[in-house]
Amino acid sequence: MSSIGHPTPTVLDFQTHVATARQTHDHRLAHESRQVSCRHQAGVLDPTPRRWSWLANTYWYVPTANLSATLFNSSTETIAPVLDQTVFQITDYANGYFWGKTVTQLGSSSPSGSSMIGSVTPEGKVLLTFTRVSGSSPTITEGYGTMVRKRGKWTMENQMFTSPSQTLQIGHWAYMMQTHLGMASWNHLPSAGVSVPEFLSESPGTGPRPVGT
């Protein structure tokens, strides 16, 4: 058979091909290794409940972009927008559970406080329960959420609706963000216009207290 136009490969050609393939393979392995390292540092590789232990002694608020909530009046079958500023004070955390208190202000109404207890799975799924005692029976609201990183920071992407047994129901979702002393939001909460300590003073105490530990 003729070999015109098809030069016979040399040993050098073969060695060059092997070297190029090996280099490509090494680059791929290095890239995959960096990805695994980044995932491990972010806490998403084989996460455990210890991943969220930093939630203890943190404060969370609703940023301006997510203040809008929905007010549903079941007696008139109408809905209307309303501003909802809510602050969480998480006082402690243990084995996937956290607790504390929350204060909420709807529009220009007076703020109201509730006890809060929540759970968070290693993967970041959140379940929240807010209990407010008024009269002889408590009012309970449940919320759901997910820990989501936005712009390099953890947020709680939460959503909730108050009890359907109430005539007036509030629905709200928000990327709740952390705040602390020294931040602008700590001194001036969006919508509420007061500092976090002043806002939380509307609900005395720190919320649930663990016993038997």
Image: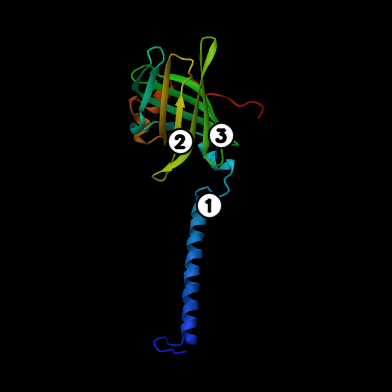
Task: Measuring from the top left, give residue 104's x and y in whole percent.
Answer: 42, 22
Of pointers 2 and 1, the one earlier in the residue sequence? 1
Judging by the rendered image, the residue that carries numbered circle 1 is 40
Judging by the rendered image, the residue that carries numbered circle 2 is 156
Task: Measuring from the top left, give residue 148's x and y in whole percent.
Answer: 45, 41
- Where, by quadrant of the figure, is residue 94 drawn? top right
- Looking at this view, name the residue that lies furthest to the right: 212
Tell me the amino acid under the disc marked 3.
Tyr
- Residue at the image point whose x is 52% and y is 28% from the top: 128
- Where, by quadrant of the figure, is residue 183 drawn? top left
Tell me the amino acid under the disc marked 2.
Met
- Residue at the image point whose x is 37% and y is 25% from the top: 69
Neighbourhood count class around disc 3 (C-alpha, 10 Å): few under 14, some 14–19, many 20 upward? many
Q: Label 3: state its secondary structure.
A: strand
Tell me the amino acid under the disc marked 1.
His
Marks 3 and 1 sit apart, C-alpha to C-alpha, by 22 Å
> Is residue 81 shown left or right of residue 134?
left
Neighbourhood count class around disc 1 (C-alpha, 10 Å): few under 14, some 14–19, many 20 upward? few
Task: Measuring from the top left, give residue 199's x and y in whole percent.
Answer: 40, 23
Neighbourhood count class around disc 2 (C-alpha, 10 Å): few under 14, some 14–19, many 20 upward? many
Which one is in front in this view, the residue at disc 3 or the one at disc 1?
A: 1
Q: Disc 2, disc 1: CB below 8 Å?
A: no
Q: Looking at the figure, which quarter contains the C terminus?
A: top right
Marks 2 and 1 sit apart, C-alpha to C-alpha, by 21 Å
Q: Disc 2, disc 3: CB below 8 Å?
A: no
Query: In this rendering, does residue 206 appear at all?
Result: no
Query: In this rendering, does residue 70 appear at all?
Result: yes
Task: Measuring from the top left, give residue 179's x and y in whole percent.
Answer: 41, 35
For this rendering, which residue is in front, 188 or 75? 75
Colour scheme employed for the rendering of this structure: rainbow
Judging by the rendered image, the residue that carries numbered circle 3 is 93
